[in-house]
Amino acid sequence: MGKKLERSDVCRVPENINFPGEEENVLKQWKEEKIFEKCSQLSKGRPKYTFYDGPPFATGLPHYGHILAGTIKDIVTRYAYQQGYHVDRRFGWDCHGLPVEFEIDKMLNIRGPEDVAKMGIKAYNAECRKIVMRYADEWETIVTRVGRWIDFKNDYKTLYPWYMESIWWIFKQLFDKGLVYQGVKVMPYSTACTTSLSNFEANQNYKEVVDPCVVVALEAETLPNTFFLVWTTTPWTLPSNFACCVHPTMTYVKVRDVKSDRLFILAESRLSYVFKTEAEYEILEKFAGQSIKGLHYKPLFPYFAERGAAVKAYRVLVDEYVTEDSGTGIVHQAPYFGEDDYRVCLAAGIITKSSEVVCPVDDAGRFTSEATDFEGQYVKDADKQIIAKLKANGNLVSSGQVKHSYPFCWRSDTPLIYKAVPSWFVRVEHMSKNLLACSGQTYWVPDFVKEKRFGNWLKDARDWAISRNRYWGTPIPIWRSPDGQETIVIGSIKQLAELSGVHVNDLHRETIDDIEIPSAVPGNPPLRRIAPVFDCWFESGSMPFAQQHFPFENEKDFMNNFPADFIAEGIDQTRGWFYTLLVISTALFNKAPFKNLIASGLVLAADGQKMSKRKKNYPDPMEVVHKYGADALRLYLINSPVVRAESLRFKEDGVRDIIKDVFLPWYNAYRFLLQNIVRYETEDLGGKGQYAYETKRHLSNMEQASVIDVWILSFKESLLEFFATEMKMYRLYTVVPRLTKFIDQLTNWYVRLNRRRIKGELGAQQCIQSLDTLYDVLYTMVKMMAPFTPYLSEYIFQRLVLFQPAGSLEHADSVHYQMMPVSQKKFIRSDIERSVALMQSVVELGRVMRDRRTLPVKYPVSEIIVIHKDEETLKAIKSLQDFILSELNVRKLTLSSDKEKYGVTLRAEPDHKALGQRLKGNFKAVMAAIKALKDEEIQQHVAQGYFNILDQRIELDEVRIIYCTSDQVGGNFEAHSDNEVLVLLDMTPNEELLEEGLAREVINRVQKLKKKAQLIPTDPVLIYHELANKGDKDSLAQLKKVLVNYANMIQTAVKSEFGAYDAKQASKKRLIASELVDLKGISLQLTICSTEELQLPSLAWSNVLLAEELKPRFGNGDKATVLLQHNLTKEFITLPILKKELEILFGLYGVSYNIYVIDQQKKLTELKAIDKNLSGKLLILARTSEALKQIEKSLEVAVAPYSKFANQPSGSTIFTENPTGQSLA
């Protein structure tokens, strides 16, 4: 277990922080101290908050969609804990079904059921079991690393026998209610995976494809030389044609084809599709589709002719689903290869629900022996031969290609076909009203997903095919007699044992397929289980019950906490998990399974395409985490459109910007607080006391507090109120922007405006009040941010909590043990919040105007004029004038309600790019009208919130308002407005203001050098300045004048002695940093030294360092110091003598090397001679200068010798160690 943090560990805060590195440290502490586990223990006995975790498959690694959903769940459940709830956070795994089987089929080259039969179900399922948790460790590592707290040990897996047993119980309940039946259904079918898919699975992967399309002539039986023209993009279904369909009221025509002299019947509206010109046909008749209902035609292929004749097939049917926007207006019907085909033929009596299926295609999508001409061919591959056959028979009118959107298998990425599949169904269609009513009991964010996408799906809900003719899944617990007359549905392991005499511990097919149940009828053969297994969506939809092993265990606990308080997944689960949860729960209890739901959008690649491993069009999530940290990734995802169920184009720059715009300012505010606590303890308390935050002291002082303290506390309390309201409504998308805004207000406004108070420049009382305020706000902020950024919140909390009074806080080990503070509304001051917002507007407008003139804030200006019609607004601005003057570096503030007095007029300029694209042909006229607008007209448009120009609505951001000032004002004014306040800034330069600006430039350079030297404000240092006598004489004279006249101002600002460089005095001090800076073309050397006297050798000396390629002998170190003068004669030594000394020091006998010199400016030269100029420089021994190229910039020239020494009264120097670490005493 790591060492507990103490105050002494945190007071010197590093300037830079490695966010990912600190996250790793926090994670290590969480693991070592079992923080998550203790969190769950602490909340035992509290009211329960229930959430369901949708189970992912562990056959692939987590992607951004998983991380997003996991982050949303983590935020909501962490917040629930902060609200005083106990939250069970169990991870779940989807272990059965197509994703697993497909991987095994690929790995073992299994192409169909016959291959599985050869190896045996036991062996096949054993292979599936091996890979089910292939990436489980990676999942746990990644999920944990992104900061999600969830229990992997107490997980649920859909392959656990107790989980499967609950599924059996659920199915038996549905069966006993009459909600289960066996039938045939045309379903999306994956030939690669040899299984049907649900409609919501089929909708997951549509692609633009090019398919063949044909127009085929069906010859009428009773009308001579007459043909019905049908069109299809699936020629492979034509061998199974049983009918054709027309629209009852659409207009059809009989035409004579000039080229073939045959008579064709088709929709009038589709003539232009079939014929290129009107000259190619002659219209003979027009009639409604209803008039040709029942007419027969000759079969295209002979395969099912006899069966068709028996049911009066091969005739014209009518239905309103036929459209006139494609094809010929006559649709070919293959009842077992199309949902509408099946419905229409069923309604016409051509087929019945118990009819023998006309389906000459096997499970792998190959033609069977029934279609003799194409036997063994994959259906899509057979298209060409079918077209050739039609052409040879004279039935082909035309063939071509069509580009259209087509469904692909979401797992194998192969085209789906629609195919009749015998299946077991749950009746859903009759439940539509109940489903909508139960859905009405739930609250969704955003609500349009529930009302539109989900609601529409429920209105058209179809019976759900829950069986799959597969192997690795929960077996459907139906035992039947061979004749189908006896059926038993098993609801538990115990019931199976009672009826069969066999007790099992596992419920997979290899265990139970051979179990027989004796018939209730003496002498009849035993009942055996039917082959299918459950669709894995049935398993995941059962998870609320099955994860608790309901009703066999935890019945009371389950019923007390059902439905769940919360679930969250991607919007793609609208027709997936969300739907299956609702169907099963409604069927069982007529109750919604959850109360609240967040549907998130899709995370796309930066180019708007779907993220693809093959295309590598997105960065690996863990690389992003290692680079920027999990907190940055979490906040980027949550502060984006995906939380509103919209799509996000993932950009790594966005994650980086979270660090820059949110985390660094937040960290710097915390660092600034701790730096000034140290200053307060050192200077104001004289090192005799310690700062501790006391609520009573802080709040009792609020009566005399600065208005800016009152403002930030009010802002905090308002945010807490808003936070509680919005989190209760699960609106994360409103909460996060307010949190990041709060960080901006704290760092860019409160801290900036209070620097002098916090630094103690306005007295100890003001200092302690501002420290208390900053501490209180940061301390509250980490609790608010904790659910969103768990790592950084923990890092800062564990350091801030050390400044709480001893024993004042329970469970202080982690921010995640803390409750969320409740808003204290008595501290909310809306009036002050508005006043500060106005002040901020004025300052921001002033900054924009300075930027326009490229005039830095360091240079003062003489006057700012603020214009507003409302006197109360002007009073509010007046109350904060000191902040305005200080922030904008202005001498005088003038307030006015008279715009005309200052000759300000408005001019409007259209945004050419935005309006040009939108208005196209109208743009020129609108542009001219906008430019012609007068001042009063522009004001009216702005007041109403938009422009109305030539009956076109133009938004304010599509027009640039330009503020012009007249000469009558005098001075050199710049004007700007945010459409509420108008601000004028006098930009007239004068000598005094320019000199003060120059002094501020000097302060800025000094502060940057102190920061670079990693000094904190309380470090005692001396700062020297030295001007180079080069450059423009006037500029040089001006800077000299500034350094003298503004010396006190500079010294006060930098909090250190500031004076002209004195070589003799500086040589006695330890050099900390030195830098040559440019000030308006003048070179200024700044030098920072420590205040203590520096002890140096009496004689000239140099430090020596070995390059990596040279190794010292005799166990000596690679650093040493040499004297460049003889101790007795004080004469400088020669180069050969120096080399001899170096050989002795490092044992470099017989080694070839060169000696290089690096000076304080890091300039590298080869040593040629020894004189006084060499003293204090660094000597490096290396074979070649090339070896030093990569490291020379990183080398530091120390101001003192590496080795310990002692100066003698005689003026000589002796070393007490040399090389470093080698004692000579």
Image: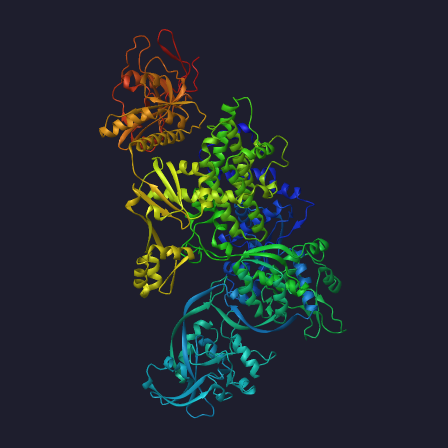
Q: Residue furthest right?
A: 522
Image side of residue 608 versus residue 1187, left or right: right
Can you give x and y, in whole percent of width and height, for residue 1065 in the image? Answer: 34, 17
Work out whether residue 1115 or residue 903 is closer to the camera in this orientation and state it.
903
Q: Is residue 1160 visible?
A: no
The image quadrant of residue 892 is top left
Work out whether residue 442 or residue 269 is closer to the camera in this orientation and state it.
442
Q: Quadrant of the N terminus?
A: top right
Height in image: 508 above or below 666? Answer: below
Can you give x and y, in whole percent of width and height, for residue 417 in the image? Answer: 49, 70
Q: How is the image coloured?
A: rainbow
Report the label total: 0
The image quadrant of residue 941 is bottom left
Height in image: 1000 above or below 916? Answer: above
Work out whether residue 837 or residue 1094 is closer to the camera in this orientation and state it.
837
Q: Is residue 1137 visible?
A: yes
Q: Quadrant of the C terminus?
A: top left
Image side of residue 1173 versus residue 115, left or right: left
Image side of residue 110 versus residue 499, left or right: left
Q: Residue at x 29, y 8 (%)?
A: 1129
Q: Residue at x 58, y 70 (%)?
A: 462
Can you give x and y, in whole percent of width and height, for residue 1215 in the image? Answer: 39, 14
Height in image: 472 above or below 362? Answer: above
Q: Residue furthest top?
A: 1210
Can you give x and y, in whole percent of width and height, for residue 1153 in the image? Answer: 30, 25
Work out whether residue 414 or residue 304 is closer to the camera in this orientation and state it.
414
